[in-house]
């Protein structure tokens, strides 16, 4: 039996990065491997024929590399936080069918995967929670989920490809409430400037025939723009294509490295890291 993903829903957006991670695992195994994504694509009832056709185009291949690189970057941040907080809560916000939490498991952290109820129902079938792992149905904008997180050993939250679907006011309110509830915690997520976000909405989402999704949150200079939200926030950012990996692997063409520079420079595609201040 295969598990169905409904068309034209925000939840359907989880297909895009999942498929990209499979493609990237096949095209750039030196840089990225996600066996779970490869397996899950086979277990989902969804028409991948168009995605398959497109996945050979140059821009879609580059898009897949972007998705895989941001996952590597976020995983780097998770592992880095766990070095100083081995018992931390590792919280995947808008997890879809991503298994980054589990791949960073150090044997003592607590892993939480959060998404809308229908995504969590699907996740429970395909990726049932393992040891020290919980999947929680929620709307991230309703902070009821805070009480489910055991942050006694610290907390690292990450969101991959999620805040593009949030209004700027929603991201701001969420960050402020998280800073209140999780002093000493850290949030990392991918973001891009207005130009890039418009492009994401036009190309990726349109090509996946998703109509009812607005791409709202955009940021150019994270430090100066997001620090204004709250004096407690410690904001830094790194380009997500070249800020963590120089992409000098021979499997990556010179043209793709050039596009990566454009992504970092003109599109401000970045991993933003926000420390909530307070307790360490
Ligand atoms: C583009 S997908 C990314 C999925 C996953 N992070 C990944 O990289 O594969 C966006 C995910 O965010 C979830 N999402 C968006 N808005 C949400 C909200 N307000 N509350 C909970 N989940 C949300 C969607 O259901 C979807 O699974």
Image (cartoon, rainbow, N blue to C red):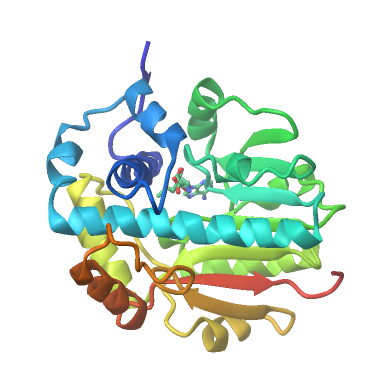
**19 over 232 or under it: above or below:** above
In the rendered view, does 23 fall on the left or right side of 239? left
| Badge count | 0
Tell me the residue at 84%/69% (across/down): 280
Residue at position x 16%, y 32% in the image: 49
Residue 138 is at least partly visible in this image:
no
| Residue 274 location (% of width, % of height) | 64, 72
Residue 139 pos. (x, y %): 57, 45
Query: Residue 115: image x %, image y %?
Result: 55, 41
Left or right placement of residue 56 versus residue 236 in this view: left
Farthest front residue in view? 250
Position of residue 185 in the picture relative to residue 223 (left or right)? right
Closer-to-camera residue (111/30): 30
- Please, is residue 42 above or below residue 141 in the view? above
Residue at 55% across, 45% down: 100
Q: Please identify the quadrant where the N terminus is shown.
A: top left
Q: Is residue 198 visible?
A: yes
- Kindly give the residue lying farthest to the bottom in the view shown: 224
Q: Of residues 90 and 61, which is closer to you in this image? A: 61
In the rendering, at what x and y percent does residue 57 appear? Answer: 12, 52
The residue under the point 62% across, 84% down is 227
Q: Give the quadrant of residue 39.
A: top left
Q: Nearer the viewer, residue 227 or 90?
A: 90
């Amino acid at each position: 039996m295969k598990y169905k993903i409904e068309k034209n829903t925000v939840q359907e957006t989880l297909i895009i990065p999942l498929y990209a991670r499979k493609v990237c695992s096949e095209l750039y195994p030196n840089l990225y491997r996600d066996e779970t994504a490869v397996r899950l694509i086979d277990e989902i009832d969804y028409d991948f024929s168009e995605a398959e056709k497109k996945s050979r185009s140059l821009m879609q291949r580059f898009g897949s590399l972007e998705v895989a690189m941001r996952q590597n970057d976020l995983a780097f941040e998770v592992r880095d936080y766990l070095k100083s907080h081995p018992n931390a809560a590792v919280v995947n916000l808008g997890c879809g069918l991503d298994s980054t939490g589990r791949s960073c498991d150090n044997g003592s952290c607590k892993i939480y995967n959060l998404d809308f109820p229908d995504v969590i129902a699907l996740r429970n079938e395909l990726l049932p929670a393992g040891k020290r792992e919980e999947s929680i149905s929620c709307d991230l904008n309703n902070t009821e989920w805070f009480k489910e997180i055991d942050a006694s050993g610290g907390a690292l939250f990450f969101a991959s490809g999620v805040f593009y679907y949030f209004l700027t006011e929603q991201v701001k309110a969420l960050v402020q409430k998280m800073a209140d509830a999780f002093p000493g915690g850290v949030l990392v997520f991918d973001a891009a400037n207005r130009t890039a976000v418009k492009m994401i909405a036009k190309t990726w989402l349109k090509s996946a025939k998703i109509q009812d999704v607005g791409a709202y949150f955009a940021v150019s200079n994270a430090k100066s723009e997001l620090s204004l939200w709250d004096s407690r926030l410690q904001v830094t950012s790194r380009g997500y294509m070249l800020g963590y990996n120089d992409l000098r692997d021979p499997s990556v063409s010179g043209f793709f490295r050039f596009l990566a520079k454009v992504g970092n420079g003109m599109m401000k595609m970045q991993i933003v890291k926000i420390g909530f201040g307070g307790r360490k």
